[in-house]
Amino acid sequence: MSPRSQAPLSVAIVGTGLVGAELISQLLSLPSPSPFKLVSLSTSTKTVFAPEGLKITPQTWLSTLKSSSEQPDLLALPDKLSVLERAVFVDNTASQDVANLYPEFLKKGVHVVTPNKKAFSGSQKLYDDILKASKEGSARWLNESTVGAGLPVVQTLKDMVASGDKIKKIEGVFSGTMSYIFNEFSTANPGGPAFSSVVRIAREKGYTEPHPGDDLNGADVARKLAILARSIPSLQSALPEGYTSVSTRSLVPDALASVSSGTDFVDRLPEFDTEFEKLQRQAREEGAVLRFVGVVDVEKGVVKADLEKYPTSHPFATSLGGSDNIIMFHTERYSPRPLIIQGAGAGAAVTAMGVMSDLLKLA
Amino acid sequence: MSPRSQAPLSVAIVGTGLVGAELISQLLSLPSPSPFKLVSLSTSTKTVFAPEGLKITPQTWLSTLKSSSEQPDLLALPDKLSVLERAVFVDNTASQDVANLYPEFLKKGVHVVTPNKKAFSGSQKLYDDILKASKEGSARWLNESTVGAGLPVVQTLKDMVASGDKIKKIEGVFSGTMSYIFNEFSTANPGGPAFSSVVRIAREKGYTEPHPGDDLNGADVARKLAILARSIPSLQSALPEGYTSVSTRSLVPDALASVSSGTDFVDRLPEFDTEFEKLQRQAREEGAVLRFVGVVDVEKGVVKADLEKYPTSHPFATSLGGSDNIIMFHTERYSPRPLIIQGAGAGAAVTAMGVMSDLLKLA
């Protein structure tokens, strides 16, 4: 008996920001016959839904959505999608509220694909609910683009684990913003720019959040580490509070912790340049550079986001540039030399590509 | 309607050498319930087949196979597998004859997974037959482990293409043997070992084929390039004779082309050390090192395997070590900085892992 040609996968998308818009464009540009049928688009205020497939093009989807008078009701969406033959919910928001709904979709047999880190890096309860709902509904959740955007990081880790490799340590530069800042600030050569001026330029280039403290606090890295750690059997329940259980060094000076304006923050950051310069000088005297890294040390049971020193001959010093991510997997099979993946780890086009690669796995 | 829990995927394996044995071990060590059911094992002289699943363990499969009196009949296998609900044929041989059978499996709805490069890097006719049979039978062929073994190279390229990224250039060190040889031979510092002595040591360590000419002729790299090139729409038919259409520089000296014994070959190789030393000195004078690389330049339409010079600051010089592969994808989205994947690109454990990752995609 030959495998049936499957029905197109019905896709419901929530979130039409940069990543969402890029994903919609990628989906609508696939050669036909497409393995996908776009059935729903939602923002926080508008929605369109057509179980037989929306009549939209890359040129018309936005105006179609804008002209809709229907308001989104995400609580009702799991039921509406579950009656379709094969459906997937794609969450392109960064919303915790949306993340909290994944179990409802999964338990009704609707797959979930998302670059939103919230569901997998928060409370153990939500994570466990997702695992349980996924079994109950025989539905899958895929989150390749939560770590490294389009880089094949999450799937590679899952394949290693599933095929019986033993993960020893994962170590990497997981934040494009932190990568840029330290690639510029911390080099082998003295006389570089002050820390605050690098942060200011990064902000001007749009490489940071509007408030750079949201990058410098390390939370984004901690969330990615929680996602990776939970994919490793022995660490699946090691972080009860998710990313807040990760040992994280914040680079936000204590005195600036309550500065709520991003502009005020960068204006005051020069007060702390001597501190950062001292760290950098110490590193240089040891023949090293500073990098803000994430480490999942399975053997020691340590998960941490921290500022570390690496010799100038280390790939984190020699090979990194721009706002690249780099991730090293040290495993039983990839030993003594690790498997390394490097490249842009942020940006709408590559993040949407990571979402697409997950969708293609389901199709 | 919630997705059905699917029946286990019936797996038929041919080839029980290093990779085959490792794969069988990985498959039989999966936690239950396994998504796979091993229904057949075959060597060139023996076979066992049980449509309900073989009663074997990691300890017993070899003796079970050895004690079988049944002879393999690969020509009959497509029919035998096609009556099962979902089946996959796994070819762990390096045989052209086995590769020639893939269309028969595919057109009968049996998926094909393999680390064997022959089918995808040979004649255009066989490749086109595979594409056609795959459509006809709605069956998939997956060959992640043909390039870079367990490294996520082929799938990453396929995801880029499928999601609409434009590949500009792929450039890499694709042969673990060539990587080791040039990492040892060609460094920034003078006074290193002679080329012939590096090749001799590589052979003693088991890093080369029994006859090192089978590595030095560049054919293995050319085959991998053909596989990658054909995954890019504009190059799908660019190599009518497959790997022999790839512009390939052989490092086998003309005078040794007919030396059929590997031992005689390494004994005579020192006669050519001055030639290799001259190339290396030229590179060093330019601040470069030599690397044997593969290039798929989509924009120029060039596919070549050649000895090239790279500045000592280039990742091919700084980051490579051991017998690592490294592959850089320059694309519209990964620009100006490429996506880079690096790590061991050969060895039974990581090759079998690449096969397993393909099997898991099907399961």
Image (tube, coloured by chain):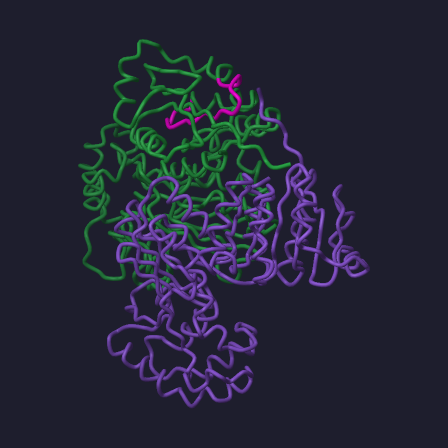
Chain colours: A green, B purple
Q: Note whether B244 is above or below B277 in the view shown.
A: above
Question: Quick one: quadrant of the C terminus of chain B?
Answer: top right
In the figure, A112 relative to A224: above or below?
above
Q: From the viewer's side, name the closer residue of B356 and B298.
A: B298
Please report the residue visible at 72 percent of the width from the left and 57 percent of the height from the top: B72
Q: Position of residue B116 (x, y in %)?
A: 55, 59
- Residue A82: x, y in percent? 53, 18
Q: Is residue A299 visible to us here?
A: no
Seen as rendered, the residue at the extreme top is A69
The x and y percentages for residue B61 are 75, 55
B174 or A215, which is in the foreground? B174
Q: Residue at x 25, y 51 (%)?
A: B336
Q: Quadrant of the N terminus of chain B?
A: top right
Magenta span of residues: A81-96
Q: Is residue A85 magenta?
A: yes
The residue lying at 20 percent from left, 37 percent from top is: A266
Q: Name the quadrant containing residue B308.
A: bottom left
Q: Magenta span has B228? A: no
Give residue B55's position: percent from left, percent from top: 78, 47
Horizontal side of B327 relative to A266 (left or right) equals: right
- Residue B59 falls in image quadrant: bottom right
